[in-house]
Image (cartoon, helix red, strand yellow):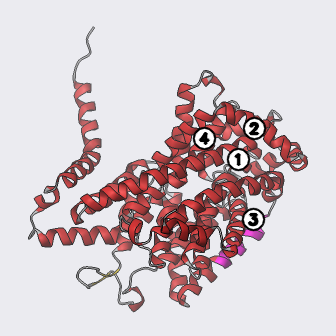
Amino acid sequence: MDGAMAQAVQQVLLDPYVWLVILLAACYGVFMGAVPGLTATMAVALLIPVVYFMDPVPALAALVTLVVCAIFAGDIPNALLRIPGTPASAAYTDDAYRLTRAGKAEQALGACLLFSVAGGLVGVVVLVLLAPFLASFAARTFSVIEYFWLYLLGLTCAVIVSRGSPLRGLLGLVIGLLLASIGLSAVHAEARLTFGRPELYQGINFIPAMIGLFGVSEILRNMLTLDGGETEVPAQTAKKAVRASGGAIDRLREASTGVLFRETLPLLWKRKWHALRSGSLGSFVGMLPGAGADIASWVSVAASKKFSKKPEEYGNGSIDGVGDGAAAKSGALAGAWVPALVFAVPGDSITAIIIGVLLMKDIVPGPDIFINQADVVHSIYLLFILANLILIVVGIAAIKTGGLMQRIPKRVLLPLILLFCITGSYAINGSYFDVLVMGVTGLLGFVLDRRNVPLGPVVLGIILGPPLEERFIQTMTASEGNLLAFFSRPVAAVLGVLVLLLWLSPLFGRGISKLKSKVPSGN
């Protein structure tokens, strides 16, 4: 065992405080994931003010465990109420709910739990094997120019894979870049977009901005359900679903642990190679900036259906679709950390927030982190393994008590969350201005969400905007304004051409479509 791993074991496995943090974060994550409308991203944003005052390893333990447990817990209302607790569960909503209505809630949720753990562990293996290799390659090959194209590639992927129209994703990206440009320029030290407010000279504080975008905006969106307003899942629908699934909820509460495992362990063993495929696929999809667990689960379910001998069952109560989707979304969690750790390019909104937390703790993502702070990297590996293992225990408890979490009135829950948002934003610097930033970004996030503008590109724009600008200015200064310098190195040229092709591909597609429409069809 090398020194870094020994230090990681001491920091993680031999520290009772870290174990306590993991347990509390697991319970918090399960609660936030199981209550419809409270997403994993929102849960991470709300936890930032707490981890701000923690040491690096306990802070990472809280964040990793929270995300792993929250992503699974979204399957509980998914199966019982036909309401995805988190967007990552939406890919197999119909299958999970039909299984519940058929009296197979134990089998459905047991499969979600065990396949989530299996997929999460596969994702850890991908992270452990791939991240050091990419870091070694980047350390030997990457310069300022390559990082410029890499950041631009990350922003491009975020626009392409985001939900809805790419134009809306591009709008979100532009808004994020504008927010990132507020304050003193990192290169020229010139004040920009400060409107004469000295509080903005250092830019927008990352923490209240994230709390606003993902916390306050979700509170505002959920408030629409209180009076039965226009929402994705009307309140009356949720009430009817609770009544319809009352029997399943009661059976889950009375079911023994042995019943849950007896129903699903044979299925996991039978489909072990499918779980491996789905976990690996989810991990690689999770590496794409802006993709995350949401898209990973959809891709995996589609692939599962493509290779299934019974594709007609998908959407009608397929336990295979449920298991493969659950494995993929858990695998994507660790996969998203690969570009985040190696290149400081977040794989999803959650790792975008976590990169901000790492920087707060003086942990700078990049190839050097595997050399200078190798103990932190090994600690992350161990934390992912522990989080997935403790999910088995906490997940069983969550399945048995899942029905109780669905009945918490939002009239009670939402004001408490808003109070926590305000307190957390103020506590960082003791600044009322940060509370104002939280409120403004919360309104912005709410408006963008209502207009179907994804928030992922906004966050990536805030995170990657400053380093992208800095690398651009450095390259232009060194080359005395010669744009060809961006293609002067082999890897940079490949990345640059790839980015340009991605941006120009819609134009090529339209041109080909027009040519085809002008060519007369043969008789």
Which element carries disc 1, helix, strand or loop? helix
Residues tagged 3 and 1 counted as in contact (Cβ below 8 A): no
Residue 106 sits in which quadrant?
top right
- Tell me which segment is drawn in magenta: 409-420
| Badge number at residue 113 | 1
Examine the rendered structure and indicate whether residue 353 appears above or below residue 303.
Answer: below
Kind of residue at disc 1 = Leu
State the residue position of label 3: 410
Instruction: Specify the principal SS of the magenta part.
Output: helix
Residues tagged 2 and 4 counted as in contact (Cβ below 8 A): no
Which badge, 1 or 4, is on the more N-terminal residue? 1
Residue 471 sits in which quadrant?
bottom left
Q: Residues within 10 Å of mark 1 (few under 14, many from 20)?
A: many
Q: Residues within 10 Å of mark 4 (few under 14, many from 20)?
A: many
Q: Residues within 10 Å of mark 2 (few under 14, many from 20)?
A: many
Q: Residue at x 52, y 32 (%)?
A: 303
Q: What residue occupies the far top of the structure in this picture?
A: 523
Residues tagged 2 and 1 counted as in contact (Cβ below 8 A): yes
| Badge number at residue 325 | 4
| Badge number at residue 33 | none
Which badge, 2 or 1, is on the more N-terminal residue? 1
Which badge, 2 or 3, is on the more N-terminal residue? 2
Which badge, 3 or 1, is on the more N-terminal residue? 1
